[in-house]
């Protein structure tokens, strides 16, 4: 497939106190979220001066992508804040771009991890009209060798930050954004949660761990709606009761240190650990690591050449099989979990 450009497509975030509430209204539009809930979440952003780190991180990634693919124009657009995807796609059309690959800042399947990005692409093309370039979303990459390597290295760095006498006994905890149980079942048999579990197993193996925990975080919505569990705070309380003295938390579900990472993990969970007398270390996310740009270049090359996806083979006991299954998540070029092999 011939490509004229690459579009880095992300979530977006406010870059000043006056932008926080409009940004949150964009995020939650049409979902009937109470104003009190928006006010509570807004305080998380105001704790950091009303600035989300995500746009600055993505600008760094944008420069890394341009350095990694010097012959390919690279654009950057967001779903919920400037630069909006609709405006960027219009600029791509004005620049004469006919077909571009889209690299989303999510490695996962399911609605919010994949299908919603496909909706962003469709909405941006519709807003641009007949002149809109063809946009092809790159595949999911939760099992890519570079994805695994970046998180495994981050775990090692985090472990080294713990007191030396506690490093060997520290409990490794993988965390990802929780979603409603019904949403997890929407795209096949536990598509998103199985992908997270598979990636956690790959990273744990690469980091040299045979035992670890997988938990969830940042749930929202009414309490009567079941979400993926266990929640990280409840799990940490159980570890404290069991006498665990040190933990390493790896936010495997996040590609960048966004507000949910730096608020939920670096504030609330860290404070909980310290109050319980547990030494706490948090692994970083890829952010604008040059290897993430190399990962994106590899996905572009797969699309151009029609070559087989570059993946890490998982532990045999998982029995996870993966294949191209565009119907599962609304994308014509997308990798999703399918029926377990064998």
Image (tube, rainbow, N blue to C red):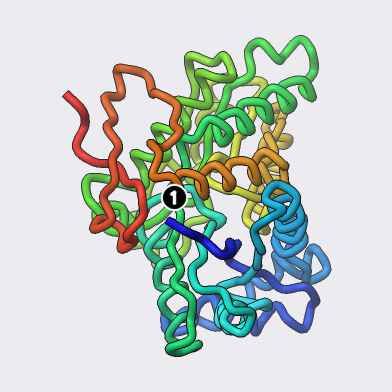
Estimate the x, y position of residue 48 in percent, counting from the top left: 80, 63
Estimate the x, y position of residue 62 in percent, counting from the top left: 71, 58
Report the residue that reaches farthest toward the right: 49
Residue shown at the point (67%, 32%) measured from the top left = 276
Give the crowd class for mark 1: few <14, some 14-19, many >=20 residues within 10 Å.
many
State which quadrant residue 27 falls in.
bottom right
In this view, the residue in front, 71 or 318, is 71
Residue shown at the point (59%, 19%) measured from the top left = 207
Report the residue that reaches farthest toward the left: 342
State which quadrant residue 35 falls in.
bottom right
Q: Secondary structure at mark 1?
A: helix
Residue shown at the point (46%, 68%) measured from the top left = 135
For residue 154, side relative to residue 7 (left or right): right
Residue 310, relative to residue 185: is it above or below?
Answer: above
In the rendered image, the quadrant that contains the N terminus is bottom left
State which quadrant residue 59 falls in.
bottom right
For residue 44, side relative to residue 138 (left or right): right
Residue 105, relative to residue 249: is it above or below?
Answer: below
Estimate the x, y position of residue 325 in percent, counting from the top left: 26, 50
For residue 167, side relative to residue 11 (left or right): right
In the rendered image, the quadrant that contains the C terminus is top left
- Looking at the image, can residue 225 be seen? no
Residue 277, relative to residue 72: is it above or below?
Answer: above
- Looking at the image, can residue 153 be seen? yes
Residue shown at the point (71%, 31%) measured from the top left = 281
Estimate the x, y position of residue 286 in percent, counting from the top left: 66, 42
Q: Which residue, given by chain and number where applicable, does mark 1 sit on?
A: 303
Residue 102, relative to residue 161: is it above or below?
Answer: below
């Amino acid at each position: 497939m011939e490509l004229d450009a690459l579009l880095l497509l992300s979530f977006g975030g406010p870059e000043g106190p006056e932008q926080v509430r409009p940004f949150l209204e964009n995020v939650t539009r049409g979902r009937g979220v109470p104003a009190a809930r928006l006010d509570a979440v807004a305080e998380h952003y105001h704790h950091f001066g009303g600035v989300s780190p995500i746009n600055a991180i993505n600008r760094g990634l944008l420069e890394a992508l341009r350095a990694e693919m010097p012959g390919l124009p690279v654009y950057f657009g967001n779903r919920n804040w400037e630069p909006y995807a609709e405006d960027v796609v219009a600029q791509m059309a004005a620049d004469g771009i006919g077909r571009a690959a889209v690299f989303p800042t999510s490695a996962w399947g399911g609605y919010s991890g994949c299908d919603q990005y496909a909706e962003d692409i469709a909405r941006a093309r519709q807003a641009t009209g007949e002149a809109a370039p063809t946009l092809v979303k790159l595949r999911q990459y939760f099992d890519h060798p570079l994805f695994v390597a970046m998180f495994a290295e981050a775990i090692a760095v985090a472990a080294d930050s713990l007191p030396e006498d506690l490093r060997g006994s520290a409990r490794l905890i993988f965390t990802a954004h929780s979603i409603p149980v019904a949403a997890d079942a929407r795209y096949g048999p536990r598509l998103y949660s199985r992908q997270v579990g598979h990636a956690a197993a790959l990273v744990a193996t690469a980091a040299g761990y045979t035992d670890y925990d997988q938990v969830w975080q940042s749930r929202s919505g009414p309490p009567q709606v079941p979400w993926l569990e266990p929640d990280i705070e409840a799990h940490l309380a159980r570890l404290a009761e069991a006498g665990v003295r040190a933990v390493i938390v790896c936010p495997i579900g996040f590609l960048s240190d966004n507000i949910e990472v730096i608020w939920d993990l670096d504030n609330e969970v860290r404070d909980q650990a310290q109050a319980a007398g547990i030494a706490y270390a948090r692994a970083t996310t890829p952010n604008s690591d040059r290897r993430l740009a190399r990962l994106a270049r590899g996905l572009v090359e797969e699309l151009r050449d029609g070559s087989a996806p570059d993946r890490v083979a998982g532990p045999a006991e998982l029995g996870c099989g993966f294949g191209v299954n565009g119907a599962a998540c609304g994308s014509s070029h997308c990798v999703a979990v399918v029926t377990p092999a064998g």
